[in-house]
Image: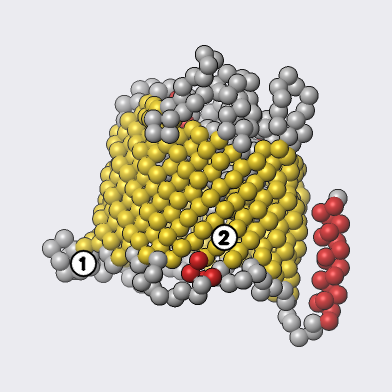
Amino acid sequence: MRIQAILLILGMYSVSVLAQEQTTKGILSGNLQVDGAYYTDSLSKAKKPEGFGINSYANFNYSYGKFTAGLRFELYQPPMIGYDDRYQGMGMPYKYLSYKSDELEFTVGNFYEQFGSGMILRAYEEKTLGYDNAFEGVQLKYNPFKGIYFKGLIARQRNFWDYSGMIRGLDAELSINEIFDITNKNIPYFLIGGSFVSRYQDPQHTTLNLPANVASGAGRLSVIYKDVNLSGEYVYKANDPSADNNFIYKSGHGILLNATYSTKGLGIYLSAKRLDNMYYRSDRNASSSSLLINNPPAIAQEHTYALSAMYPFATQAQGEMGLQSQISYKFKKNSLLGGKYGTKLSLGLSWVNDIKRDSIDGFAIGEKGTLGYQSDIFALGEHWYTDINVKIEKKFNDKWKGSFTQLYQEFDNNVFHVGSYHGKIYSHISVLDFTYKFNTKHALRTELEHLFSKQDKGSWAMAMLEYSISPNWFFVIWDQWNYGNEMSADRTHYYTGSFGYSRKANRIQISYGKQREGVVCAGGVCRYVPAFEGVMLSVSSTF
């Protein structure tokens, strides 16, 4: 009720200001998204919700002078399968009023925010995952002097249609070069930041002495010099007994190191991360992706091709350590390997292990009510995930261009739980993607994929054709065939046909086909999708 009262008071004030500023024009903007499906067959034991599902939302934002107000209406009647049933319903879970001047920005209502890399705090939405941990409260951003930036917030956190918990956070960032007005490009650019976050929850009456407040702190540094960018962040979280860690009293730690080098034709990216007991929620009893305060960045490359993304990496905040590297090089035009148009070569590696845990004082590792375990920062635990990939992209002439990708993946399904298979999965994946351009408007893209594996459901093959008539129409057909399944009755063809029309800011797409069982991920957060057959509709518009 307090938030609604503040919104009402500031809303009345802004209206009075608007009435006095007749020379300023207001701007209304927004967007609409409607995704629906009619299920003709579930193809699995998954629940088929009333034969159909619909996920839709509409955002409206109005700006007038220094004020901005907005709201979002959402409807899930019922949610599409693969999305949490607790989204069932309709309403306006997101609304805000904001004021922004040269130095100050003030928001009441709902908002999203991120401190540093997100290891200590990140509120965001990802509609494809059904993920939204928006804040509801008060947020302040202040820039008193050049190069000095402050953020502060007091808020609750979205939990489907409700808001719960209590989070307080402060963040400061100093741009040393801006503060001292250093513009010489031969002098490194320094950015220093620090964050503090506290979560409050009633300790409740239990046999355990649970902390009401769980505090965390972070420090970060970024140095940019010419073509090199180095950054690092360390996060500490006080003991936080929860359902995630079996209610142990161990503190949490997170380290993230990044390095990039970029020059003409060459790009290099290196990253290292270690997490230990870093689940951080506004409710100690929550699980899955609910009420997460933080969101550590993923340490694995996200693939867009269907079969290369069949076994996706999901961040394990309870404990993981890994490395990721990406190297891209473009051979020059008219060189031996570059040819007339040049050739781009990309190499990628992701390597993730569990952390090693040792017992303390004779207690079992992770025993409830104890310190849980101790862990050497450099000691490796069990190997979980490997992704080695190479991609070659080439334009052959004015009509033909294409790419070839080869991947090797190791995937521990005892950890990531894709389907019902138990154990490690080893796969070799090949992707051929090429486009033929008939003229300036008509083009045909062909995608051929193959996944070879002796584990889980065995090998897969995929073929896709996409015909586009620029700038309005596109037509797509594809088939994923599980030809290597040991059960001959399950060697299913997952075929789909789709077409769409786009005009200006409006887009409509209609599809019919079969969806295979699997997991969809973005940024290390994942959602399970059961197999089904049906008609799908997607409509979007922006204004």
* Residue at the (57%, 60%) spot, across then down: 173
Identity of the residue drawn at 50% across and 34% down: 276
Q: Can see residue 75?
A: no
Q: Marks 1 and 2, Cα distance to the nearest angstrom?
A: 40 Å
99 or 445: which is nearer to us? 99
Q: Which is more toward the observer, 176 or 226?
A: 176
Q: Give amino acid for label 1.
A: Lys
Residue that lies at the very extreme toward the top in this rendered image: 362
Q: Count neighbours of disc 2 (C-alpha within 10 A) and say few if under 14, some if 14 to 19, many if 20 or more.
A: many
Secondary structure type for disc 2: strand
Q: Could you tell whether 7 is left or right of 494 in the image?
A: right
Mark 1, residue position: 332
Vertical placement of residue 323 versus 151, above or below: above
- The C terminus lies in quadrant: bottom right
**Colour pattern of the rendering:** secondary structure
Under mark 2, the amino acid is: Glu
